[in-house]
Image: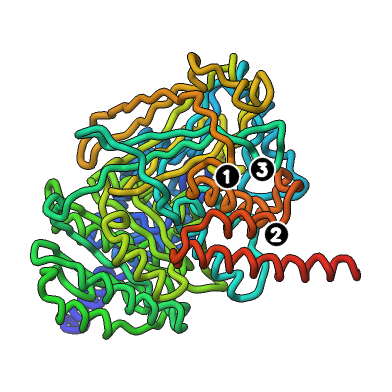
Amino acid sequence: MRIAFAILLFTCLFATASAQYYLRGEIRDEKGNSLSNARLKLQSSNLIYYSGVRGSFGIVSTKETDSLFVSLDGYQDLAIRVEAGRYHIIALKMLYSAAHLQRNRLVSLTRDLEQEERKKFLFSGETYSSLVENEFVMARKNPETGFAIHADRAAYSNIRRFLNMQTTVPPDAVRTEELLNYFNFETSPLAKDSIFGFRSYISDCPWNPEHQLLYLNIASRKIDSNEIPPSNLVFLVDVSGSMDMPNRLPLLKSSFKLLVDNLRNTDTVSIVVYGSTVGVWLPPTSGGDKVKIRKSIEEMYPGGATPGESGIRTAFRLAKSQFIKGGNNRVILATDGDFNVGQSSEDELEKLITQHQEWGIYLTCLGVGMGNYKDSKLEVLAKKGNGNFAYLDNEQEAEKVLVKELTQTLFTVADDAYLNIRFNSSVIKEYRLIGFDNKAKALADSLNEVEGGEVGPGHSLLVLFEVVPVRGPGAEAYPTDEPLANLSINFRKPNESLRRISEYRVESNYTEFSQLPNCYRFATSVVMFASLLKQSKFAHQYGWNDVIIMADEAHRKGDYVQEEFISMVQKAKKIYGKMRKRKGRE
């Protein structure tokens, strides 16, 4: 009898000790949006769990009531009691600093423009577009405008891909400033110890005799090879199943092997992959050990889903562990942009990247592929990461970005840079910034700000304004004793918090269009090409032939990049001409 009782008592105690309860619920923000990858620590076991794609969690506990400690970057930590049998909705409060970071940021901003005027910009187009083209602005009412300076060039090679495929280009894929960035135009003279040089011209507008074009050329300082700081580079490579195409992972492998040839013994390289697994593929390795790095690159293979958010977190943690003070600390993300597992929305990714770049670790994005290529996501990531963005459509482009222009791609001379210009309303009646178009979402946001960009060494940026002079077109419209405008460039040096300002006077130096340096006339043809692709309402006065003639007359003979541009315009003429004929028959 005693033995039976002992067995019964032991069985009851064991059953109680081994009882399992299921704790379920979701992690959300204050607006009810799901929060994935929140860290959940269970008090009874000290085990760590993470919320799923839709913020949900399910945890096995030995206790019917237990405590969860919930944390997520950008949100206040929370401790909460949870009970089995209940479905818990747990809301995290956003930290003030994170809320500030999540504001929609503008590419360009005209000061004191009223919200109703912004709405005109927003809805003036015949069809909806996520990019809203800049309109003419009255200089007397709104004399001041500003825009981010950056060296992104991705739109150009992406457009080339569409045209090589004999298809039209989505208007939203055309970012005029990135087409201009693709060509390193004339370099402005730099004063000693200056970061930027500046030159300007005012000339005739080829598509409107009543208007004129203002050209602003901003050049950044080159750096000598002995000035280049050591690099801590983390290659973050998408090896998911969607990358299993010749123009995706194989192209990236060839591209990275080109970059490896330029590494030095003082550089450190690591590789993180994400696909069927997320992890460190190559631990931190000296740039001098090229054989090991190349072998590691060659052995990457595609497969699995696309846990991009986890890959980004792993890469930044690794970059932080190898941080070089005063060096070039950078994650290079290479992907088709298809983030389908983890924090996949643009807002969530913006917050994640912005928080990490505050550590001084920049982000360069390399896009590849077609079909599911997410241009918008990579553009956002690069800008939030104080980095740049390129699209690789072939090995020649990879060589251009990662070999010929390596210092411009991987190094910086100015961070968070933006240009501010204040027009002289006694000389300029109206003006229109060409390019630097804003997203509709950012333009509609009343709390938005201009977000500065990153500028690499030796880059020549060309910006065009279409202006309406007060006194009519021609040299007589510009008195030599009055400036057209005053210009300032705001920026920070890398690894510094101090903001610097370089100021310039935009002189009234009118030059006939035929007398402009060739590079400025060629740049005008690039702007006209972009406007035709965007199907802009400002491009009704000219056609493809006008662009071809202007580019052919102004291009530098023997310059492969400029000659290729002319062939791209010729392809576009045929593609869009066929489309127009089909519409006519219909």
122 left or right of 397 in image = right
**Tag 3 near tag 2, CB within 8 Å:** no
**Tag 3 near tag 1, CB within 8 Å:** no
Give amino acid for label 3.
Answer: Pro
Q: Is residue 143 above or below residue 104?
A: above
Q: In what element is the residue under mark 1?
A: strand
Q: Residues within 10 Å of mark 3 (few under 14, many from 20)?
A: some
Quarter of the figure with residue 250:
bottom left
**Tag 1 near tag 2, CB within 8 Å:** no
Label whose residue precedes the other's in the sequence (3 or 2): 3
Rendered location of residue 223, percent (x, y): 21, 48
**Residue drawn at the location 20% of the way across and 58% of the way down:** 319
Q: Which residue is mark 2?
A: 545
Q: Nearer the viewer, residue 423 or 214?
A: 214
Give amino acid for label 1.
Answer: Lys
Q: Is residue 139 above or below residue 173?
A: above
Disc marking residue 439: 1
**Residue drawn at the location 64% of the way across and 63% of the way down:** 169
**Residue drawn at the location 27% of the way across and 63% of the way down:** 314
Q: Residues within 10 Å of mark 2 (few under 14, many from 20)?
A: few
Q: Which residue is mark 3?
A: 206
Disc marking residue 91: none
